[in-house]
Amino acid sequence: MAESIPGFYAVIPAGGIGSRLWPLSRADAPKFLHDLTGSGRTLLRDTWDRLEPLAGEGRIAVVTGRAHRAAVERELPGIEDHNVILESEPRDSAAAIGLAAAILARREPDVIIGSFAADHVIRGTRLFDHAVRQAVAVAEEGYICTLGIPPTEASVGFGYIKKGGELIVDAAPEAAFVERFVEKPDLETAKQYFTDRSFLWNAGMFIARADVLLGEIAENEPELYAGLMDLAEVWDDREARGPVVDRVWPTIKKIAIDYAVAEPAAEKGRLAVVPGHFEWDDVGDFASLAKLNSHGRGNDLAILGENARILSDASSGIVVSQTRRVISLIGVKDIVVVDTEDALLVTTSEHAQRVKGVVDALKLTGRDDVL
């Protein structure tokens, strides 16, 4: 087994409900607490197991909501108490990652942190390790580094990173500057990006010296930076922490790290990218979940659920069952069926992105009991 990376600390932001995976993913059981691959482990546990050899024992922090603390600690019995960073309410990724950076920088001024979402699926651990080690080498040179995934298809479901010129770092032969970020494109544009090959999927993984990351936040979002510093100053003092959190956290700006850090850093030539040649998916909807569990064979029916009772004849798509109900499918293609005790979803892979609209409608009509 390869040695852990000296001076490296992994951060796992474990937030977000994953509303496009409703009714499987909910406020009290978000996406990262589910086994979505049939591995027998939740996505959070898979993320931890992937990062522990790189960071080393006791060097992984999880940022999560207060409501999920007990579940996170059950999933990760090895996590140290001071490495569970609790948000009183969600404030988006810049606050979550920035707070972890500020706390860890106070404990260890020269620390390099890597942020890796709790709800992504990654296959190819050796290739993942190789990419992270390159990114750490880039971070040691004072850059913020992200991992970009070479596209395997013309996807409209992901944002993209445009690679710029080569960045010379001996231990990171694949590193390049980031020219710009691109939002999710339409299909024709995605086809152009796929042909171009200088475009990578934006996987939302960032590696940097904590002080460099915080410096970028200070430059671009000074009020956010000030709030994070106030919180970090008292975080490890339990008696002092509570009043400061109650006063400061509601004022923290909601903004994604892409906008607060990555895009401004790219414009100033401070952001690099290392291609990650491992299999990656953010499992953003049931269409991607179906593809993930059918191993790319479009004529398959993927089935998830420990006690699923499914009868299928000439059908494809995905069925997720949390009940003992018999579900029979005959001659339907690209179907999505999600059967839970109190809600049933039926749609198709083509319309999987529209599930979020159902969640929004349920919120508007006050049906919070199924959210």
Image (tube, rainbow, N blue to C red):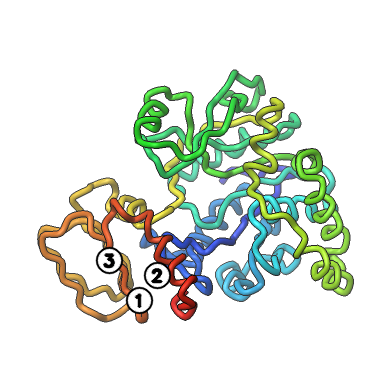
Q: CA distance from mark 2 to mark 3?
A: 11 Å
Where is residue 43 drawn, in percent x and y? 48, 60
- Residue in the image at 62% along x and 74% along y: 67
Which residue was labeled with disc 3?
Answer: 346
Is there CB contact under 8 Å for labels 1 and 2?
Answer: yes
**Which element carries disc 2, helix, strand or loop?**
loop
Tag on residue 23? 2
Label 3: how many residues lie within 10 Å, few (<14), some (14-19) or many (20+)? few
Which residue was labeled with disc 1?
Answer: 343
Q: CA distance from mark 1 to mark 2?
A: 6 Å
Label 1: how many residues lie within 10 Å, few (<14), some (14-19) or many (20+)? few
**Which element carries disc 3, helix, strand or loop?**
strand
Q: Amino acid at mark 3?
A: Val
Q: Amino acid at mark 1?
A: Ala
Q: Is residue 340 above or below residue 265?
A: below
Q: Is residue 347 left or right of residue 176?
A: left
Q: Is residue 104 left or right of residue 123?
A: right
